[in-house]
Image (spheres, grey):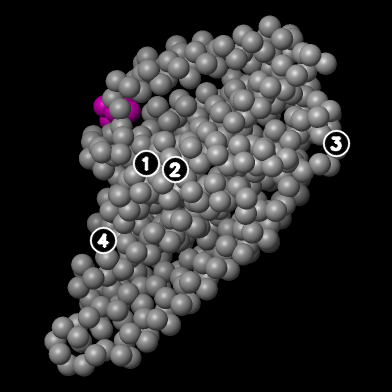
């Protein structure tokens, strides 16, 4: 019986890293968005930096999703 | 030639029926947590899942040339009657677990069915047991754990990062994210599972001489397999959606997003690496991790235990039913008819039992006490399945 432990470990490691990375980036985007809302609501500014940060975060998540779809389609 | 045509027709219809049960059994995988957190309204969620499952059927260009991934020796004896018996076992097990609201793996049911029918129809040498261990059993144990750990960690971090921000705002954000993460799971599901049915029908047509060796599935096969899984998905296996969405843990949007992201990632990574794992088990594992990683850190262990038992039972139970079916179906046309009748009767009676305590789009989130819903039909069901 030939069990490829290395491949299994690699799959596990990649899955863990990608999941945590995507959720962290998405959560940061979420946080930035709510900072912006707070800034706009309090009238201290238009929260442009926060909005840009949120945009970058969500764009990164979108890129990962698109890569995921390309993986499905290429199979 | 005539009897082959009859059998082939029966196999094709049964394969589409399996595809249908596969669809409604697995709606919960992608959509349970999105429905539970209110990210999507129940009807909208199943509609999106149905469309994406249909789209997924067309997405992959690689032809499903193998339905068993080397589990059984396809050249030695994958006759239509064996495929038929395998499908019968898989469908009945899918329906029984749906009735009990338990997410079990449709793929494992199909593999179990193939193994059981092959052992009876061909013999033990027809099954590659080392492939069963390395391609099914090990991923089956590892994948829910990996998804669970990933989802647990992601949930913890998601709460940690957003702890300073107002809850309503961030929950709204995570709900939006859930729409995408659950859609990705649906798409991946359609690609994987509709392909299995296409593979079954294509191989059957080849064995009957209607297609040449190495031919791809004809368009009508792709369309009908996609439609069957999409229709099944749209029916929504509400019982399973309830178990997964609110039966395991109280899921809030950050948890839902984390568990769906974990599940989508594990599914895509491992299918890229060539592991045929169960979407159902990965998603359930993700939800368990998210439940434990959430603010309350609570998981309903009773439900988790029942799911784990079901996972262990799926392969052998489907194998036994399919083995019996193969024994009868091998006798010829009348045998096939008897098995077909048993399938219709078994499926029908399970549907009748389900009507006593229906679960549908309007009460799926009611978080009803899981015990009576699950336990009541059990006594009635047992004889049904034995008979089937």
Rendered location of residue B353, percent (x, y): 36, 18
One can see residue B215 in this view: yes
The residue under the point 64% across, 37% down is B197
Q: Do the residues labelled 3 and 2 touch (CB within 8 Å)?
A: no
Rendered location of residue B209, percent (x, y): 84, 28
Q: Are marks 3 and 1 on the same chain?
A: yes
Q: Are marks 3 and 2 on the same chain?
A: yes
Q: Earlier in the sequence, mark 3 or mark 1?
A: 3
Mark 3–mark 4 distance (CA, rounded to whole Å): 58 Å
The residue under the point 26% across, 43% down is B365
**Residue B27 has which mark?**
2
Q: Quadrant of residue B226?
A: top right
Rendered location of residue B128, percent (x, y): 76, 36
Q: Which of B63 and B367 is in front in this view?
A: B63
Q: Do labels 4 and 1 share a chain?
A: yes
Residue that carries the numbered disc 1 in the rendered image: B241
Q: Earlier in the sequence, mark 2 or mark 4?
A: 2
Q: Magenta includes B136?
A: no
* B291 on left or right of B285: left
| Labels 3, 1: front one | 3
Residue that carries the numbered disc 4 in the rendered image: B295
Mark 2–mark 4 distance (CA, rounded to whole Å): 27 Å
Residue that carries the numbered disc 3 in the rendered image: B212
Mark 3 Cα shell of 10 Å, populated few (<14), some (14-19), many (≥20):
few
Q: Which of marks 4 and 1 is nearer the N terminus?
A: 1
* B297 on left or right of B45: left
Relative to B173, say whether B61 is above or below. above
Mark 4 Cα shell of 10 Å, populated few (<14), some (14-19), many (≥20):
few
From the image, give the main secondary structure of the stretch colored magenta: helix
Describe the element under mark 4 as helix, strand or loop. Answer: loop
| Labels 4, 1: front one | 1
Describe the element under mark 3 as helix, strand or loop. Answer: loop
């Amino acid at each position: 019986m030939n069990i490829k432990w290395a491949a299994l470990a690699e799959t596990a490691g990649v899955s863990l890293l990608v999941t945590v990375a995507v959720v962290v980036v998405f959560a940061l985007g979420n946080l930035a968005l709510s900072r912006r809302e707070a800034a706009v609501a309090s009238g201290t500014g238009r929260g442009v930096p926060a909005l840009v940060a949120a945009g970058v975060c969500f764009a990164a998540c979108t890129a990962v999703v698109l890569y995921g779809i390309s993986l499905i389609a290429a199979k | 030639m005539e009897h082959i045509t009859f059998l082939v027709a029966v196999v094709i219809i049964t394969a589409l029926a399996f595809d249908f049960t596969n669809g409604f059994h697995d709606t919960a995988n992608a959509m349970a947590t999105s429905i539970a957190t209110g990210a999507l309204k129940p009807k909208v969620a199943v509609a999106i899942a149905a469309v994406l499952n249909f789209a997924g059927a067309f997405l992959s260009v690689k032809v499903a040339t193998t339905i068993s991934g080397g589990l059984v020796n396809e050249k030695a004896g994958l006759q239509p009657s064996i495929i038929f018996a395998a499908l019968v076992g898989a469908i009945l097990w899918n329906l029984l677990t749906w009735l009990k609201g338990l997410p079990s793996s449709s793929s494992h049911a199909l593999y179990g069915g193939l193994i059981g029918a092959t052992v009876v129809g061909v013999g033990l040498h027809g099954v590659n047991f080392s492939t069963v261990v390395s391609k099914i059993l090990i991923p089956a144990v590892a994948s829910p754990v990996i998804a669970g750990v990933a989802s647990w960690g992601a949930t913890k971090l998601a709460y940690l990062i957003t702890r300073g921000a107002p809850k309503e705002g961030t929950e709204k954000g995570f709900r939006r994210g859930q729409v995408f993460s659950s859609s990705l799971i649906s798409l991946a599901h359609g690609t994987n599972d509709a392909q299995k049915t296409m593979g079954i029908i294509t191989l059957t047509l080849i064995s009957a001489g209607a297609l040449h060796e190495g031919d791809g599935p004809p368009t009508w096969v792709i369309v009908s397999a996609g439609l069957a899984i999409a229709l099944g998905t749209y029916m929504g296996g509400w019982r399973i959606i309830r178990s997964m969405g609110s039966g395991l843990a109280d899921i809030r949007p950050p948890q839902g997003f984390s568990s769906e992201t974990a599940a989508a990632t594990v599914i895509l990574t491992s299918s890229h690496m060539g592991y045929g794992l169960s979407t159902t088990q990965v998603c359930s594992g993700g939800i368990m991790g998210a439940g434990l990683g959430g603010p309350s850190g609570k998981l309903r262990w009773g439900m988790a235990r029942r799911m784990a038992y079901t996972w262990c039972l799926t392969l052998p139970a489907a194998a036994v039913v399919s083995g019996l079916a193969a024994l009868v179906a091998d006798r010829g046309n009348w045998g096939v008819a008897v098995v077909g009748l048993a399938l219709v009767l078994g499926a029908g009676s399970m549907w009748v039992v389900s009507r006593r305590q229906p679960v549908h789009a309007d009460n799926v989130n009611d978080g009803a006490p899981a015990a009576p819903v699950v336990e009541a039909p059990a006594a009635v069901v047992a004889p049904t399945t034995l008979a089937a």
